[in-house]
Amino acid sequence: MSLEVTVNAGARGVLRNTTSVAGNEADPVGANDSDTETTLVSMPTQFFTVAPCRVVDTRGGAEVPVGGPALAARSARTFALAGHCGIPSTAQAVALNVTVTQPGAPGNLRLFPAGLNLPLVSSVNYAAGQTRASNVVVALDASGGIAAYADQASGTTVHIIVDVSG
């Protein structure tokens, strides 16, 4: 499934995204939930590209600004992105490629502005042991951070890799 939205500069309004899961094949957690997520769109904003850069890799590595450990299931973890990989402190959102790898259980990853309520819509779904990726645009909190939440069986972990492009 993919979603593309084009919003003209200066536009204001509401973006409503309704999701529905047909069966366990599409939802590895088996919840078969349907939901509507409503987001207020307030423009004008501008999109600036940055050279693709790995900003988070929980597997570790000295060359990555934000590292491990693996993301624990059912707890939100904040990642400060502003100031890394060319992301300015004035950025309001980031365009990301997010990858999950080595998940200990089936589940989904949710990315959202740090400090806000957990969204009902996932950024990427996965089965145990799978590596999956997705492109997302995530609003930043006032400090330039995002939160990540792995909705999978308690006591398990998943590694996440986040590359920024804008």
Image (tube, rainbow, N blue to C red):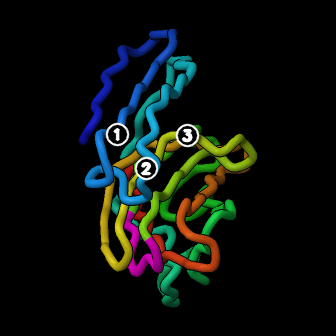
The residue to which callout 1 is attached is: 21
Residue shown at 63% from the left, 79% from the top: 155
The residue tagged with tag 2: helix, strand or loop? loop
Mark nearer the viewer, 2 or 1: 1
Span colored in magenta: 99-105
The residue tagged with tag 1: helix, strand or loop? loop
Residue shown at 68% from the left, 64% from the top: 75
Say what amino acid the circle numbered 3 marks. Answer: Leu
The picture places residue 56, in percent across and down from the top left corner, at: 51, 70
Give residue 103's quadrant in the image. bottom left
The picture places residue 70, in percent across and down from the top left corner, at: 56, 80
Say what amino acid the circle numbered 2 marks. Answer: Ser
Residue shown at 41% from the left, 35% from the top: 47
Which disc is residue 120 wearing?
A: 3
Please indicate whether residue 134 sits to the left or right of residue 154 in the image. Answer: left
Mark 3 vs 1, N-terminal side:
1
Residue shown at 31% from the left, 22% from the top: 6
Say what amino acid the circle numbered 1 marks. Answer: Val
